Image (cartoon, helix red, strand yellow):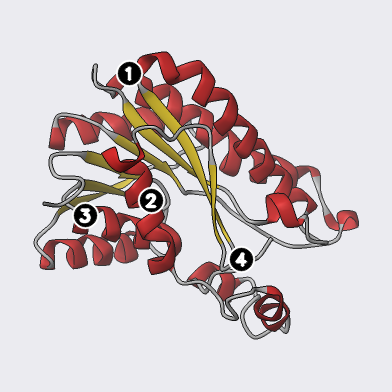
Amino acid sequence: MSKLNGKVAIVTGASKGIGAGIAIGLAAQGASVVVNYVNSKEDADRAVAEIVAQGGKAISVQADVSKAADVQRLFAETKRQFDRLDVLVNNAGIFKFAPVEAVTEEGFHHHYNSNVLSVFLTIQEALKYFGTAGGSIINIVTAGVEMNPPWSSLYTSTKSAVATITRVLAKELGARNIRVNAIAPGATDTEGAKAIGFIGSGMDTQMISATPLGRLGKPSDIAPAAVFLASDDAAWVSGDILFVSGGLR
């Protein structure tokens, strides 16, 4: 029996990369999945098509989750299509590596709105839609919250904030049977990593050499952790950060 039969999940930022991998993984275990995207409709529809081709259920919904009105529309459409919500995966976000001198006011607010404000907005809305049985919230952070690598002060600080939010809300929402956990991926081969020049820059080989399992991660490496945290197998797990990083810390 599939672990997530009958459950409905929203995965933000799920048009490609880790988000798409998680969406596909959840659907493979029986969940109906809402693939959220901001701009990449073609990629989101491709993820939906892959899920449907494998016998799953999914829709794509455009929404900028750093904007309250868009978040409200995303959740309303989920309710309209699937009539419930059980799982929220906060994957949407941006990342850029640069020295501290390069941090700008605009870049600061863009990172914090995309990576932190969005988490508050989606969780606030999810609380209106989770049923009496509760739900599972899964926030995607980064192994960098322990590694603290140079040139990542802006990005890693946003993910450290999300790690704190995870631990606090696990205590705040536990009485409502809402579990809140996070996944901390290590260096992962995604479209985003290629777009910022990480892959092939030499930084990737440094990360590989620092990773005990000796390779970059793949989105399909992250998805099983999300399935676990979304499922009843994790019924006694809340407030934890699960490192899925090949041992990289």
Q: Regarding mark 1 in the picture, which secondary structure is present there?
A: helix
Residue 213 higher or lower than 144, as above or below: below
Q: Is residue 116 left or right of residue 125?
A: right
Q: Would you place residue 7 above or below residue 37 in this image?
A: above
Marks 3 & 1, CB-CB < 8 Å contact: no
Q: Which circle, 2 or 4, is nearer the viewer?
A: 4
In this rendering, does residue 40 appear at all?
no
The residue singled out by tag 4 in the image is 247
User: Which mark is on residue 128?
Assistant: 1
Q: Which mark is residue 192?
A: none
Taking depth in this image into account, of 12 and 207 the one nearest to the observer is 207
Query: Along the polypeptide, which appears first: circle 4 or circle 3?
Result: 3
Residue 164 is left or right of residue 93, and the answer is right
Q: Secondary structure at mark 4?
A: loop
Q: Nearer the viewer, mark 3 or mark 2?
A: 2
**Residue at left offset 60%, top offset 38%:** 162
Task: Estimate the x, y position of residue 59 in percent, counting from the top left.
Answer: 20, 50
Q: Nearer the observer, disc 3 or disc 1?
A: 3
Structural distance between the alpha carbons of marks 3 and 2: 11 Å
- Give the structural element (helix, strand or loop) at label 3: helix
* Residue at the image position 19 percent from the left and 29 percent from the top: 84
Label 4 is placed on what type of residue? Gly
Q: Amino acid at mark 2?
A: Ala
Residue for badge 3: 27
Real-space CA distance between mark 4 and mark 3, rounded to the nearest whole angstrom:
27 Å
Q: Is residue 27 visible?
A: yes
Spatial CA span between label 3 and label 1: 23 Å
- Mark 1 to mark 2: distance in Å? 22 Å
**Where's residue 197, x and y in %?**
65, 77
Q: Is residue 197 left or right of residue 52?
A: right
What residue is pinned by disc 2?
Answer: 226
| Of callouts 3 and 1, the N-terminal one | 3
